[in-house]
Amino acid sequence: MGITGAYLGRFQMFALHHRSVVEEICANYALDVLYVMVADWPERTQENPLTASEAIQIAKLSLTNLGVRTEIRVLPFPLTPNQDFEAQVGIGLERFNLDLTFSGSSSTLKALRRCAGVLGFTVVELLERGSCHSTDIRRWIARGDAQWKNWMAPEAVKFIESLSLAERLEALGTGAKRPWAEAKH
């Protein structure tokens, strides 16, 4: 199949900075395929308000017209409560025959490093970027502050608006940002 990579994240708003990361990965690595793997966690909280299918749709819309040679495939990455996160990462990635993996999350990087030797891929740590984070975008949406639109791909804004996220965020309880990585085993 050629050289394959995976960019793993929660993507609880796949924003312009995520799109830039994908562009940089494609520019700096000769990948034939890049899997953008969206955490699929069954519980909704203010930190994780989107379903996997919603987050995937936002990512796909955000990656429209990217103009790279690399084939980009956006997929759910199922995570199950009360199971070891690092083991789930290894099991979830084994079928992909990856050469490279990318993440900016310390817990995901730890899990990737744990299974890299067995699965034979190289782990690339992504550096913190930009002044806006997905947390900021969710807060702006919850407050009704339209500046969130400046940090999102125009193709994704209309879809996000259709989700009534301000109301959803208000109704949801707070919770851990990465509950799968914080669960006790």
Image: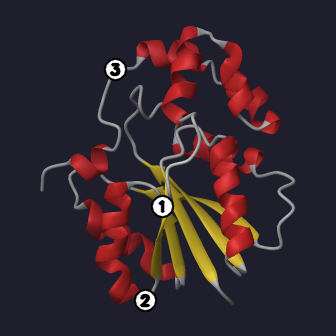
Tell me if I can see residue 84 in this picture: yes
Circle 1 residue? 103
Mark found first going from the N terminus, 3 or 1? 1
Position of the N terminus, as image quadrant, is: bottom right
What's the CA distance linking mark 2 and mark 3? 40 Å
The type of residue carrying mark 1 is Ser
Circle 3 residue? 173
Q: Nearer the viewer, mark 2 or mark 3?
A: 2
Q: Residue at x 58, y 20 (%)?
A: 165
Q: Nearer the viewer, mark 2 or mark 1?
A: 1
Note whether 118 is above or below 26 in the view shown: below
The type of residue carrying mark 2 is Gly
103 left or right of 113 in image: right
What's the CA distance linking mark 3 and mark 1? 27 Å
Q: Quadrant of residue 33?
A: bottom right
**Disc count in the image?**
3
26 left or right of 126 in image: right
Q: Where's residue 41, x and y in %?
A: 40, 46
- Which mark, by number, is residue 137? none
Mark found first going from the N terminus, 2 or 1? 1
Q: Where's residue 127, x and y in %?
A: 50, 56
In the rendered structure, are the residues bearing label 2 and label 3 in contact, judged by CB atoms less than 8 Å apart? no
Q: Residue at x 32, y 57 (%)?
A: 107
Q: Secondary structure at mark 1?
A: strand
Q: Residue at x 48, y 81 (%)?
A: 95
Q: Secondary structure at mark 2?
A: loop
